[in-house]
């Protein structure tokens, strides 16, 4: 009997190898077209930061997973984030602006600038709605006029896609990628080949499975996953300690309790994102008692520790 792949595609090492390795352009092109939906689809890409295992031999996590240009010279950035902090939207704008400005070289004019598209795949919800994909452009509020050839930022909140297995074949390509990125580790190669037989998915599945069979890469992806878990756990601990130490005199008991509930809800959503579970909505968490939130957080934290041990 075939084994489950067991490698999570949303770990940065695996994600960048699948979508950022020369030879895997078919995967990146499919994902880009699914998100951007240009009138004339992207047909070719050139990597500006091609995948290399040496990029992952330090403890520093890669900020931008994939950077490429298409046949028209447009700059394309794709990144995946396990945990989304409150400042993430500003961070996304910063990196998009930086990539846009970096195009200019000595002797070039502003007319040489090409549009920059930043695609942020998020394992945790950022916006309080049910919309999987958001598109942000520079647009005039009154007339609706768009500043073309400038900057666009797209967010795809993978946690919001919870389509049933039976619906995957008829889903949109974007939804199929959402399912594959979230759930491919829980399938065998044969199951994925039958479920998603498109060439782009066959290539992605083969690349993901290959990591399991290469000792060096399997060790690397395990280390990267553990590093991500450690960073997020430390972040949660630091927030908790900071809130405890930083409480000023005069804060009302009710505010303290509200802060505790907010902290528990954030922790639960972070843990769920790290585990690849569906992220519980803010409205559902708000309806739970503090004791229920504490129990949920403790259970999820134990699962994380068991998985990384």
Image (cartoon, grey):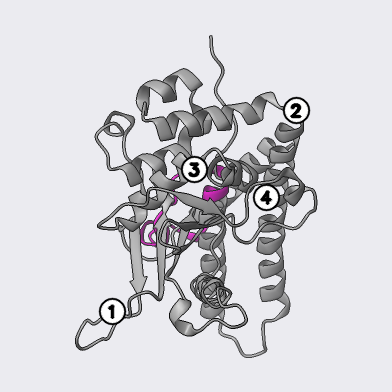
Residue under the point 56% across and 84% down: 252
Residue 270, located in which quarter of the rendered image? bottom right
Structural distance between the alpha carbons of marks 1 and 4: 40 Å
For the residues carrying marks 3 and 2, which lies nearer the camera in this image?
3
Q: Write down the region rendered in magenta.
A: 272-290
Tell me if residue 84 comes above or below residue 145 in the rendering.
above
Using residue 17 as the reference point, say whether residue 76 is left or right of it.
left
Structural distance between the alpha carbons of marks 3 and 4: 29 Å
Q: Counting residues from the N terminus, which is met first, the one under dot 3 or under dot 4?
A: 3
Residue under pointer 2? 215
Q: Counting residues from the N terminus, which is met first, the one under dot 2 or under dot 1?
A: 1
For the residues carrying marks 3 and 4, which lies nearer the camera in this image?
3
Q: Counting residues from the N terminus, which is met first, the one under dot 3 or under dot 1?
A: 3
Q: Is residue 291 visible?
A: no
Using residue 127 as the reference point, say whether residue 172 is left or right of it.
left
Structural distance between the alpha carbons of marks 2 and 1: 49 Å
Residue under pointer 4? 229
Q: Are marks 1 and 4 in contact (CB under 8 Å)?
A: no
Mark 2 Cα-neighbour bin, 10 Å: few <14, some 14–19, many ≥20: few
Q: Counting residues from the N terminus, which is met first, the one under dot 1 or under dot 4?
A: 1
Structural distance between the alpha carbons of marks 3 and 1: 30 Å
Residue closest to the eye, 194 or 83: 194
Residue under the point 25% across and 57% down: 39
């Amino acid at each position: 009997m075939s084994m489950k792949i067991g490698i999570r595609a949303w770990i940065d090492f695996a994600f960048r190898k699948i979508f950022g390795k020369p030879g895997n352009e078919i995967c990146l092109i499919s994902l880009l077209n699914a998100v951007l939906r240009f009138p004339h689809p992207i047909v070719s890409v050139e990597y500006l930061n091609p995948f290399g295992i040496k990029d992952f031999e330090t403890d520093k996590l890669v900020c931008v997973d994939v950077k490429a240009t298409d046949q028209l010279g447009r700059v394309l950035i794709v990144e995946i984030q396990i945990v989304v902090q409150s400042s993430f939207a500003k961070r996304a704008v910063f990196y998009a602006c930086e990539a846009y400005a970096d195009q200019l070289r000595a002797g070039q004019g502003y007319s040489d600038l090409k549009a920059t598209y930043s695609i942020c795949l998020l394992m945790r919800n950022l916006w309080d709605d049910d919309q999987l994909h958001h598109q942000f452009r520079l647009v005039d509020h009154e007339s609706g006029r768009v500043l073309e050839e400038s900057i666009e930022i797209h967010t795809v909140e993978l946690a919001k896609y919870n389509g049933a297995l039976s619906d995957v074949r008829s889903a949109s390509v974007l939804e199929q990628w959402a399912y594959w990125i979230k759930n491919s580790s829980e399938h065998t190669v044969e199951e994925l080949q039958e479920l998603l037989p498109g060439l782009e998915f066959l290539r992605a599945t083969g690349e993901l499975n290959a990591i399991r069979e290469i000792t060096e890469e399997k060790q690397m992806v395990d280390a990267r996953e553990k590093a991500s878990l450690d960073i997020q756990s430390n972040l949660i601990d630091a927030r908790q300690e900071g809130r405890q130490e930083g409480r000023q005199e005069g804060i009302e008991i009710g505010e303290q309790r509200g802060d505790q509930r907010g902290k528990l809800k954030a922790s639960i959503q972070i843990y769920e994102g790290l585990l690849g579970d569906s992220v519980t909505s803010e409205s559902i968490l708000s309806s739970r008692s503090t004791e229920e939130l504490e129990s949920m957080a403790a259970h999820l934290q134990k699962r994380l520790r068991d998985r990384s041990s």
